[in-house]
Image (cartoon, rainbow, N blue to C red):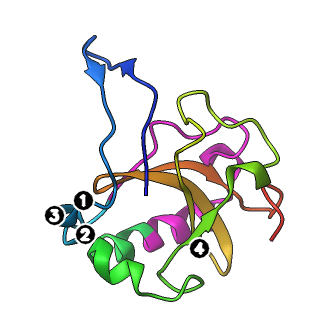
Amino acid sequence: MSNKLQSRKGDDGKRIKATQENQTPYQFDYPIFCFRHIHRIYGLEQCTANEKSALIDRLYKLSQLTWQQISITQRHGFGFEKIEQTSIKTEIPKHITKDVTLYSFRFDGLKPFVGYRSTYIFHIVFIDRDFTLYNH
């Protein structure tokens, strides 16, 4: 699986390069969740207090599992599913190239949050609280 991002400058001015998500050592690491690239329309601001609480609860529980454990879990449980970029109904941030794989996790019932993985970091890009981001 490829997970390349366009080269860009980080906060310190140095170039950032993505690495392959399926490198063996990272499968046994625990995920870290990042909100740096959250979408302006599908972000935390649109969530209710209960949804925010449910999201934090889900992130905490996921952070207790390794990537390998998550990968063998049911997609509507603590697992994930791949989402085709072409199925996203809103603008995808420019730093996400065509070869980046998007994944959906569930929180607060079956509400998805969508993002991409870079090594052991999962970058949350969309919080689809009203099921309008893609066809479910």
Q: Would you name the residue on which mark 3 appears?
A: 25
User: Is the C-beta separation of discs 3 and 4 under 8 Å?
Assistant: no
User: Is the C-beta separation of discs 2 and 3 under 8 Å?
Assistant: yes
Q: Would you name the residue on which mark 2 appears?
A: 27
Q: CA distance from mark 4 to mark 2?
A: 20 Å
Is 72 situated above or below 8? below
123 sits left or right of 24 in the view: right
Residue 106 shows which numbered tag? 4
Is 59 situated above or below 92? below
Q: Amino acid at mark 2?
A: Gln
Q: CA distance from mark 3 to mark 1?
A: 6 Å
Q: Which residues are magenta?
A: 32-58
Question: In terms of secondary structure, where does tag 2 sit?
Answer: helix
User: Is the C-beta separation of discs 3 and 1 under 8 Å?
Assistant: yes
Magenta segment includes 31? no
x and y, in percent, of residue 16 in the image: 30, 26
Q: Amino acid at mark 1?
A: Gln
Crowd class of label 4 (few under 14; some 14 to 19; many from 20; radius 10 Å): many
Q: CA distance from mark 3 to mark 4?
A: 25 Å
State which mark lies toward you, 4 or 1. Answer: 1
Crowd class of label 1 (few under 14; some 14 to 19; many from 20; radius 10 Å): few
Sequence-wise first label, 3 or 4 = 3
Q: CA distance from mark 2 to mark 1?
A: 7 Å
Q: Would you name the residue on which mark 1 appears?
A: 23
